[in-house]
Amino acid sequence: MKQILLAVALLCACCTAAFPADNEKEQERVKDSGVVLKEILNIPDDIPQNLLDKAECLVILPSVKKAAFGFGASYGRGVMVCRGGEHYTGPWGPPALYALEGGSIGFQLGVEGPILCS
C-alpha cells in the first residue's frame, strides 16, 4: 500500500507538466503536495497501514496559514487524490486542486503558519 501511495506522490510531482505553462502556482502546489506526502510516508511513525488501506481520498495541504485578533481566518492550498471505481476501492486517480478557507470569531489572538529554517 505504501508503494501505491508513493506512486501517487510521484504522480503528483510529475503531473506538473500537464498544466499550461502560465499556471506556475498550480504546478508548484502539486509538486509541494507530492513532496509532503512522500515525507509523511518516509517517517518512522507514519500513517497506520490499515488506515491507508481504507482511505477513499487523501487531501494534502502543504501550507495552511492561520491568524486571529478577535476575528480569525485560515487559508491553505493543496491537492486531493481519490480512488476510482465503485465505492472508491479502485486505483488512485489524478490530483485535483483544492483550497481551504475559513473564518472564526471569539476570544483569540495569534498567528500560525510554517516555520522556515535554514
Image (cartoon, grey):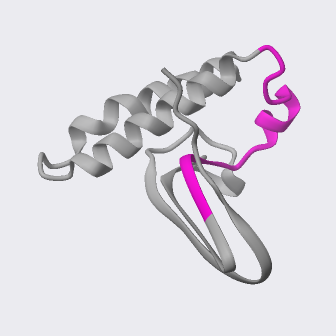
Q: Is residue 115 above or below residue 14?
A: below
Tell me which corner region of the image, top left, top right, bottom left or bottom right, holds residue 39: top right
Q: Where does the magenta region start and end?
A: 44-66
The residue at the point 48 percent across, 61 percent down is 98
Task: Say whether residue 54 is magenta.
Answer: yes
Task: Name the spot of residue 17 as percent of width and height, x first.
Answer: 22, 36
Outermost residue to the bottom: 105
The residue at the point 32 percent across, 36 percent down is 15
Tell me which corner region of the image, top left, top right, bottom left or bottom right, holds residue 40: top right
Task: Say whether residue 69 is magenta.
Answer: no
Judge from the rendering whether residue 108 lies leftward or rightward of residue 5; answer left or right: right
Q: Is residue 16 above or below residue 57?
A: above
The residue at the point 73 percent across, 69 percent down is 109
The residue at the point 28 percent across, 50 percent down is 25
Q: Is residue 102 above or below residue 10?
A: below
Q: Is residue 24 above or below residue 44?
A: below
Task: Name the spot of residue 45 as percent of width and height, x first.
Answer: 84, 20
Q: Front-most of 41 and 68?
A: 68
Judge from the rendering whether residue 16 lies leftward or rightward of residue 63; answer left or right: left
Quadrant housing the N terminus:
top right
Judge from the rendering whether residue 68 lies leftward or rightward of residue 118; answer left or right: right
Count the labels in the image: 0
Task: Name the spot of residue 24 as percent of width and height, x first.
Answer: 22, 46
Outermost residue to the left: 21
Task: Name the spot of residue 50 as percent of width and height, x first.
Answer: 87, 32
